[in-house]
Amino acid sequence: MFRYMLVVMLGLIPGFVFGDEAAQILHDADSFRLPNGSVRVETDVRQYRNNKLDKERRYTVYIKPQRRSLVLMKSPLEVGQKVLMLGDKFWLLTIDSQRPLRITASQKLLGEASTGDIANMTWSEDYVTQNAEDVICPQLTATISDVDVERFLKPSECIQLNLIAKVDGVTYSNITLYIEKKHRTPIKADLFVNSGKKAKEAWYAKLNSSNDKYIDTMVLIDNIQSTHHTVINYNNIEPKECPDEFFNPAALIRNTLPGW
């Protein structure tokens, strides 16, 4: 009874958002990361240590509805390897393996970028909004190599969503998400693991002047070592159908996917 009364009272406080409206805000934020339907995303990931470029990798990611993703590794050292996501299950497929290897969403691909960071680009399918409120937007002040931080969005009014995972197998158990209030563009996310520890923070930007819709850059900053960061560039996001047979781990191990 007390909990119900608390929710009712909070709902009467200006700046607090609940229920369907909070879910719609999260859905709107997702629309800046991916269009609806099946999509291909050309991705470039750069790892920095002490603000110096350490490694770089390229991936082609095919995303289909119902939490299905296929990551094709395109860099010379990894070409032929694949990561498959089906719901809460992940597999790594290598060119010299006879069977798919089960991995987790938190498995590191490069730097601060995990398997889940690359394969899954939506929140509304995986998280429920615990509460939402109006806040002052956070501002990125760190020096980020290879990124002009002056080109990040710097709104003053944000909506803060506190998200809790509603499905198993996601990379982060909790997310504190900051969304620009007027257009509902994602600005920043604090990412927490199962222990409740903040693992890293993500900053989102539309840095390409020709991109008027989608987020094209995500910067992941290590929570302990702030000079360690990973820049993920989404070089091309476009609708693209990928055959359903590509999402069978047993069949995929024998398919090199030429031309994809």
Image: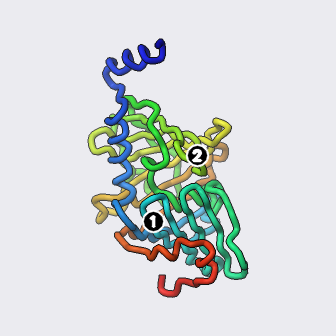
Question: Residue at 46% across / 56% down in the picture?
Answer: 121
Distance (Cα) linking label 2 and label 1: 19 Å
Q: Residue beneath label 2, please? A: 172
- Mark yes or no: residue 177 visible: yes
In the rendered image, the vertical position of residue 216 relative to residue 245, given as above or below: above
Question: Residue at 53% across / 42% down in the picture?
Answer: 165
Given residues 144 and 25, the one toward you in this image is 25
Given residues 216 and 40, the one toward you in this image is 40
When asked about the image quadrant of residue 51, the answer is bottom right
The spot of residue 71 in percent (x, y) is: 54, 70
In the rendered image, the vertical position of residue 143 relative to residue 84, given as above or below: above
Residue type for callout 2 = Tyr
Instruction: Judge left or right: residue 90 versus residue 31.
Output: right
Given residues 108 and 227, the one toward you in this image is 108
Helix, strand or loop at label 1? It is strand
Q: Residue beneath label 1, please? A: 63
